[in-house]
Image (cartoon, rainbow, N blue to C red):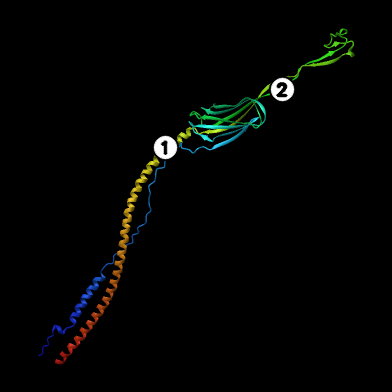
Amino acid sequence: MRVTRTRPTDRPWVPLVAAAVLLSLLAIQSVQILTPSAVNAIYPNYGSFPAVQPFVETLNQTAPPSQTVTTVSTDHFTIQFTFPESADPGKTITISAVTTAKSSKQVNSLSIEVLAYVNKQLAKVATTTVLTDRYVYSGNTWQTTLTVTILQSIDRSMMIGTVTERWEEPSSYYQSYGYWPYYPDYPNYYPYNYTDWPYYPNHLNYYLYNYPYEPSYVTVEKSSQQTIPLTYVLATTPEYEQLSAQHKQLQQEYDSLLAKHNDLSSKYESLRSDHDQLAAKYNQLGVEYEAASTELNNFRIYTYVLIVVTVALAGVVAFLLFQRAQVSERPKKQDR
């Protein structure tokens, strides 16, 4: 009986099988590695949320009123007024008047008055006399200034200006005695009692005479007055007081909302700073994720190649083992 002993060195397929098993284990383990999920979070770019400065508004703070020019005419004069369009109570305004004579005339007086409604009653607040008992010539001019202090009691209304001119106009009239008879035979007439007229025997010798008075002259004073609207007084009204109270209430609500807005703005800026930091970290992690994804994809490719090589190697080893087994069985058959 012949016994054949096989040494380990006579079996070269053993290391090949061991290597194939190890490579297969490594390939299976690499395939089981899970790919990290993609980072799909989107960080929007938030704009700024600035704080708001308080809005300060003063109701009584108004722009300077514009000047208004108005011209008025009397019989012998033209007066041009210049005055502010509006004014508040307690203010002092100036009304200027330029008077120009239109014709030559003896004038008794020329005066200007300013009236306003005080407690719903028309009252005089300023007056001035431009001319008094003077003979004027056409083209003469006079400059007059009225300073008016607007009282607190003046109603909200338009002030009124009046220009009054007074002068005298002469007139004449005649007064006669009536018609009286003239007759030459003075002693030879006697009245006829039946009528009011006397009986004249020598009636052909008389005729009537008219004995009038000398003409008499009298002067008549005449006047001319013109009225114009002047400065509008911006006095308060009940409606204004109501709106002013509503304005104050709304101003308080606005200040409260403004404080809340500024507080939220401060918090928003803090959160936006945190957001910017997180966004920067997110971008950095995104770059690292892309690098890791690329490396992982490369590793997958290498793993797949290694699996193919391992399978091929395992097939070769199996084929070699199969061939070796057949070769070893042939001597046994021959020995038998």
Residue 37 visible, this angle: no
Q: Which mark is residue 248?
A: 1
Identify the residue shown where x is 70% and y is 23%. Answer: 170
Residue 1, disc: none
Element marked by disc 2? strand
Q: Residue at x 89, y 13 (%)?
A: 205
In the rendered structure, are the residues bearing label 2 and label 1 in contact, judged by CB atoms less than 8 Å apart?
A: no
Location of residue 246 by image quarter: top left
Residue reaching furthest left? 1
Q: Is residue 279 left or right of residue 241?
A: left
Q: How dense is the environment of label 2, judged by Cα within 10 Å: few (below 14), some, or many (20 and up)?
A: few
Q: Amino acid at mark 1?
A: Lys
Spot occupied by residue 54 in the image (x, y as percentages of width and height): 40, 43
Alpha carbon separation for disc pair 2 and 1: 69 Å
Q: Is residue 115 above or below residue 185?
A: below
| Quarter of the figure that contains the C terminus | bottom left
Quarter of the view holding residue 75: top right
Q: Earlier in the sequence, mark 2 or mark 1?
A: 2
Front-most of residues 295 and 38: 295
Could you say where residue 259 lies in the image, as x and y percent from the top left?
36, 43
> Is residue 157 positioned above or below 289 on the image?
above
In this image, 260 relative to 186: left or right?
Answer: left
Instruction: Determine whether 75 is above or below 276 in the image.
Output: above
Residue 248 placement (x, y as % from top left): 42, 37
Residue at the location (33% across, 49% down)? 267
Residue, disc 2:
171
From the viewer's side, name the closer residue of 177 and 76.
76
